[in-house]
Amino acid sequence: MQASSPKDLHLPTIPVSYPLLLLEILEERGISRDAALRDTGIQPALLSQAEARLTTLEWVRLATNALQLSGDEGLGYEYGLRLRPSAHGFLGYAAMTGANMREAVDLGVKYFRARLRQFHLHFLQDDEWAAVELRERERLPVLRSFFIECVVIGLSHLHSTLIGEARAEGELWFDWPEPVYYARYRDRLPPVRFSQPANLVRFPKTYLDRRPLLADEAAHRQALTQVEREYASVREEEDGDLVARVRAELHLSLGGYQDVRTLCARLGMSPRTLRRKLGAQRTSYQTLLDEARQRDARHLLEASDLDVQTISARVGFDNPANFTRAFKRWTGCTPSGVRHSRTKEQAH
């Protein structure tokens, strides 16, 4: 998937509560706010304004400084463990005061992009387990693992905080191999599984019926009103770009990619209207699906030890030979060639 445009990087979309937490962690480690903000373009006065937002570029620069100054590659773990419900603004308050955890999950799935537009949440469940999957609107070009760790671990911490358990039952999934720094945080985290097909928080389905400690119907309605207003503003800004919306939906999950009918139901339009509107922007559902397949196949080849046949099935090919031909058409090289190059680089 294509990286965010320069215009997107300069839009003020990151709520100031998120960088403030990072600065708090750094100050506890003896790193001054001035040092952390150096060369980020962030004006210190902006941080005192409750409704202020930073640009994505400013947030990335601050996170880069934080990782370099702290010398802690696992800083995303610390951040996620410290992420308070209140950092999510009215959405956090709405989740804390809802009638049950299912309601809190539903709120996150519907409104999360009002807080962090780079991501959206997807709900999954089977007979025993439920999961909240974090999906990228567009694949993050830099500091990907840091930002995903912040959010996924933060969601897990939020879940345990709402029901009042120090460590709720469940596990975390990440789609990259286990990093060295994980060992230092292992005892503070739920069980973690690496090289998985998605980034998510997984927990017993029975937790969906649990009542948050601060459940309060009146407070919930008040918070939800504010969430709706914030969300309406985001939709007004973003919904004009249909290609970006389709790309956001075509994320590889446990069930594969959405088909046209499922996608159209989510977008609120007919398959015919989708074809017409995408055609007007000189693309199609199949073109965008192939783009997603290429992106995710390359990522799995480079970041996991899954064999080519398994990767082929995950990105929607019944026959590995067809996958190999398609991948070569997309990239000019074969899947085994990409895997061989990665192995060769690791050997050096």
Image (cartoon, rainbow, N blue to C red):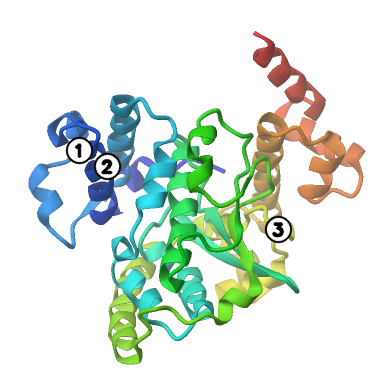
| Residue 40 numbered mark, or none | none
Residue at figure coordinates x 71%, y 39% from the top left: 297
Label 3, label 2: how far apart the Cα atoms are: 38 Å
Secondary structure under the numbered disc 1 in the rendered image:
helix
From the viewer's side, name the closer residue of 162 and 42.
162
Residue 36 placement, left or right of 167: left
The residue indicated by pointer 2 is: 25
Q: Position of residue 212 (x, y in %)?
A: 43, 78
The residue furthest top is 348
Crowdedness of circle 1 by 10 Å Cα count: few (<14), some, many (20+)? some
The residue furthest bottom is 218
Q: Amino acid at mark 1?
A: Glu
Q: Position of residue 171 (x, y in %)?
A: 61, 55
The residue indicated by pointer 3 is: 257
Secondary structure under the numbered disc 2 in the rendered image:
helix
Label 2, label 1: how far apart the Cα atoms are: 6 Å
Q: Amino acid at mark 3?
A: Tyr
Crowdedness of circle 3 by 10 Å Cα count: few (<14), some, many (20+)? some
In this orientation, does residue 26 appear?
A: yes
Answer above or below: position of 144 versus 112. Answer: above
The quadrant holding residue 217 is bottom left
Nearer-N-terminus badge (3/2): 2
Foreground tag (1 vs 3): 1
